Image (cartoon, rainbow, N blue to C red):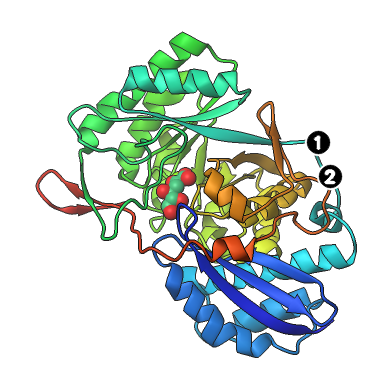
């Protein structure tokens, strides 16, 4: 089964997405997500100029060899642009293999380890009262797990807090907007948020919280301690992920479960964190961590150390990534949870998919392949629109972490 064409499709149905479509001489094709929020065209060019020409004529069934060719064969290994491009090709090839076998992808991976994939939704409010209302809506929709974020008093704009209610879109401007951040105000506010939430809803639901890399290890240790009584499912991205040793400080002081890794691209980014058992959940996912082939290796390493998966699932990962992740989640033995931020109707129309939501769980569906396609005609109606995440500064103007 030879690869005869590779298309790179860039479109903006509500937000930008990059999609790879690999076509074979047997007429079977596969699609992969290649979206890197705010750097979309870098991956599109990488694929068009440096990957596609090398793959034409190769056997589409040789997924492992193609993965190694793109990883080892490129002198400049790793990094988000390279690994997103590899992830997209790998996803499309697994889609082809499963379609050729006439099986849903989870069957090829080893079959079902569970009936449904528990997901968490995003409840955001401009203050605690609004967040409580949003959490109530998710509970009414059947969610078992909810990420809760709230605006911080004294700060005009807080990451993760929606402008529209259904989901938030962090890449909100043609050039980056600037937000002001205060660690002091934030640390005072978050324990109050979870105190109110547990008071109102009790302890039957899982609550999660994303710090978005804003703290130092010592501050994160303090926050973890102050949140322990509210029994969070996890505290995410407490400190910037480069400082891996910092997690030892957090661990010495708190038992709050820690999640990390949505910005990780390879097993090398999380090897020490996993082997030292400094985290509880690894958030790497298909699109940014080298596809199914590589994500499987990360999950297997994590399993040895009692670490479970918690794949990133924000709206800047296309429904193709979500579909592939759901097959992975259905198989992976050490599954923890899947993020599900829900795409807009425009996005869903461009990416028809087999996955469905019911009672707090997603189901990948029984279509062969990963079950997600792209409507190229519709996609062509939405041209690329440059969009950036905001940047953060401290109150005195110092640049801070996103
Ligand atoms: O591109 C950045 C987003 O994916 C990120 O802001 C979302 O932190 C995020 C999350 O946990 O979904
Ligand atoms: Mg996050």
Q: Is residue 343 left or right of residue 123?
A: right
SS type, badge 1:
loop
Q: Is residue 370 left or right of residue 174?
A: right
Q: Position of residue 109 (x, y in %)?
A: 81, 57
Q: Nearer the viewer, residue 236 or 256?
A: 236
Q: Of the numbered discs in the image, which one, if any, rests on residue 115?
A: 1
Residue closest to the far left: 396
Q: Position of residue 219 (x, y in %)?
A: 30, 38
Q: Position of residue 64 (x, y in %)?
A: 75, 75
| Neighbours of disc 2 within 10 Å: few (<14), some (14-19), many (20+) | some
Residue closest to the far right: 101
Q: Position of residue 210 (x, y in %)?
A: 42, 38
One can see residue 79 in this view = no
Q: Is residue 126 left or right of residue 28?
A: left
Q: Are marks 2 and 1 in contact (CB under 8 Å)?
A: yes
Which residue is located at x 45 percent, y 65 percent?
Answer: 383
Q: Which residue is mark 2?
A: 112
Q: Disc 2 to disc 1, how far (Cα)?
A: 7 Å
| Quadrant of the snapshot with the N terminus | bottom right
SS type, badge 2:
loop
């Amino acid at each position: 089964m030879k690869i005869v064409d590779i298309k790179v499709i860039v479109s903006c149905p509500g937000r930008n997405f990059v999609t790879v479509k690999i076509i074979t001489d047997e007429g079977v094709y596969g699609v992969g997500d290649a979206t890197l929020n705010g750097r979309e065209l870098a991956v599109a060019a990488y694929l068009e100029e440096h990957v596609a020409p090398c793959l034409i004529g190769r056997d589409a069934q040789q997924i492992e060899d193609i993965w190694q060719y793109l990883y080892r064969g490129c002198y400049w290994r790793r990094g988000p642009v390279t690994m997103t491009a590899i992830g997209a090709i790998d996803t499309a090839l697994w889609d082809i293999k499963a379609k050729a076998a006439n099986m849903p992808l989870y069957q090829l991976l080893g079959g079902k380890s569970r009936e449904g994939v528990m997901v968490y939704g995003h409840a955001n409010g401009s203050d605690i009262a609004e967040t409580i209302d949003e959490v109530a809506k998710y509970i009414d929709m059947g969610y078992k797990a909810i990420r809760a974020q709230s605006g911080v008093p004294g700060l005009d704009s807080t990451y993760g807090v929606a402008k529209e209610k259904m989901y938030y879109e962090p890449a909100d401007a043609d050039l980056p907007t600037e937000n002001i951040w205060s660690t002091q105000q934030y640390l005072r506010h978050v324990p109050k948020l979870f105190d109110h939430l547990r008071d109102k809803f009790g302890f039957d639901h899982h609550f999660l919280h994303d710090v978005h890399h804003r703290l130092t290890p010592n501050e994160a240790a303090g926050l973890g301690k102050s949140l322990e009584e509210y029994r969070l499912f996890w505290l995410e991205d407490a400190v910037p992920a480069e400082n891996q040793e910092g997690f030892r400080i957090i661990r010495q002081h708190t038992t709050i479960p820690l999640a990390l890794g949505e910005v990780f691209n390879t097993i090398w980014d999380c090897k020490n964190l996993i082997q030292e058992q400094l985290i509880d959940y690894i958030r790497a996912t298909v699109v940014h961590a080298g596809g199914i082939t590589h994500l499987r290796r990360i999950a297997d390493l994590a399993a040895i150390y009692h670490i479970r998966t918690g794949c990133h699932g924000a709206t800047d990962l296309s429904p193709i990534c979500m579909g592939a992740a759901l097959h992975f989640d259905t198989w992976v033995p050490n599954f923890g949870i899947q993020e599900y931020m829900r795409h807009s109707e425009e996005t869903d129309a461009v990416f028809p998919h087999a996955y469905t939501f019911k009672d707090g769980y997603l189901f990948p569906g029984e279509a062969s392949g990963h079950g997600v396609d792209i409507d190229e005609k519709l996609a062509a109606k939405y041209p690329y629109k440059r969009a950036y995440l905001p940047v953060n500064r401290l109150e005195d103007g110092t640049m801070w972490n996103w």
